[in-house]
Image (spheres, grey):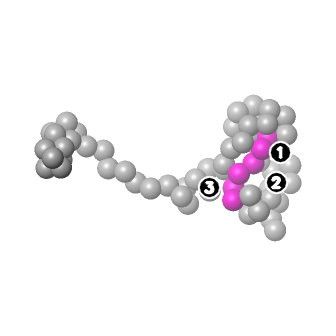
Amino acid sequence: MKKENVRCPMCGTMNYDVDLDETGGWTKCRLCKAVTCSMDEWKKHTVSVPLLNEKQFVARSMTRK
């Protein structure tokens, strides 16, 4: 159980002794009550999504009809 100090990205308040392992990286700010996830946790759960240009989009939409 590792406790960390986490700064709220919304209001800048420092939240002390937060157990990110227990909450899956999520914290609730003690001042503004915003619920946020640390960036390290987001990196673990992100998925790459390819971006299509207009020609690729049209080509894919035509093949699905």
Q: Which amino acid does label 1 sit on?
A: Asn
Residue 56 seen in render: no
**The quadrant where residue 59 appears:** top left
The quadrant the N terminus occupies is: bottom right
Label 1 Cα neighbours within 10 Å, binned few <14 / some 14-19 / many ≥20: some
Q: Which amino acid does label 3 sit on?
A: Asp
**CB-based contact (under 8 Å), mark 3 and mark 2:** no
**CB-based contact (under 8 Å), mark 2 and mark 1:** yes
Camera-nearest residue between 61 and 36? 61
Residue range highlighted in magenta: 24-29
- Indicate which disc, 3 or 2, sits on the residue closer to the N terminus: 2
Residue beneath label 2, please? 18
- The image shows a total of numbered marks equal to 3
Q: What residue type is labelled 2?
A: Val
Badge number at residue 40? 3
Q: Where is residue 24 in the image (x, y as percent from the top left)?
A: 69, 59
What is the spatial separation of the Cα atoms under label 2 and label 1, in whole angstroms?
7 Å
What is the spatial separation of the Cα atoms under label 1 and label 3, in whole angstroms?
16 Å
